[in-house]
Image: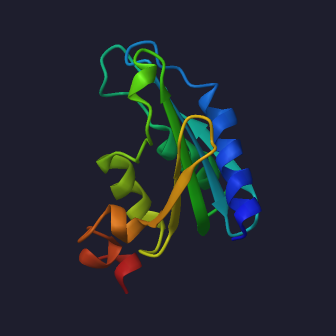
């Protein structure tokens, strides 16, 4: 990916972040998932008063893409902001559940961009760096492990 393509992906994640529903934590998160087809799928976090049904932005984007038949992905950009504690700033990394979810569909060298709330600064890493010793399809018997 070129630097411009990375920046564009981060900006699409920021647009999605602005649509987030986060009345409890005040942490809005957006994601933009680039499929190998070239199409970009966005998602945002959707909180729930009972917390466990909350859906993260990353999984929201993946679910949209999977629903459309995509199965191969090139990169993901994640961006967030804390509207309750704006001074907290910083980068929003995917949670453990999202990392494990990505492991099901992405290779270990899958690119993840994590950006600040303005989308001006981002870090690039791999899924393997975020989920060392992850549990993947190859660890269980079944059709995918053949």
Left or right of 99? Residue 82 is right
Task: Reply above or below: 62 against 44.
Answer: below
Percent of width and height locating residue 88: 38, 27
Q: Which of 89 and 139 lies nearest the eye of the viewer?
A: 89
Quarter occupied by the N terminus:
bottom right
Percent of width and height locating residue 108: 41, 74
Q: Which of 62 and 75 lies nearest the eye of the viewer?
A: 75
Q: Which of 94 and 39 lies nearest the eye of the viewer?
A: 94
Please give the name of the residue rendered at 60% of the width and 31% of the height, measured from the top-left corner: 17
Please give the name of the residue rendered at 31% of the width and 22% of the height, measured from the top-left corner: 51
Task: Reply above or below: 54 against 134.
Answer: above
Task: Reply above or below: 94 against 80.
Answer: below
For the image shown, how many numbered marks are present on the structure? 0
Quarter occupied by the C terminus:
bottom left
Question: Is residue 45 in view?
Answer: no
Q: Quadrant of residue 139?
A: bottom left
Left or right of 94? Residue 132 is left
Please give the name of the residue rendered at 23% of the width and 71% of the height, measured from the top-left corner: 133
Percent of width and height locating residue 123: 50, 57
Colour convention of the picture: rainbow
Percent of width and height locating residue 128: 36, 70
Question: Is residue 39 in view?
Answer: yes
Task: Reply above or below: 4 against 146.
Answer: above
Left or right of 104? Residue 58 is right
């Amino acid at each position: 990916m070129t630097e411009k393509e990375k920046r564009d992906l981060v900006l699409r994640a920021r647009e999605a972040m602005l649509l987030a529903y986060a009345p409890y934590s005040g942490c809005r998160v957006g994601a933009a998932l680039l499929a190998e087809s070239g199409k970009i799928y966005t998602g945002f976090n959707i909180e729930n008063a009972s917390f466990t049904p909350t859906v993260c932005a990353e999984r929201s984007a993946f679910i949209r893409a999977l629903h459309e038949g995509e199965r191969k992905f090139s990169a993901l950009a994640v961006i967030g902001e804390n509207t309750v504690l704006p001074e907290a700033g910083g980068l929003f990394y995917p949670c453990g559940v999202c990392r494990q979810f990505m492991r099901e569909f992405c290779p270990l060298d899958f690119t993840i961009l994590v950006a600040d709330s303005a989308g001006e600064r981002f870090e690039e890493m791999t899924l393997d760096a975020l989920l060392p010793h992850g549990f993947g399809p190859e660890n269980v018997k079944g059709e995918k492990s053949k």
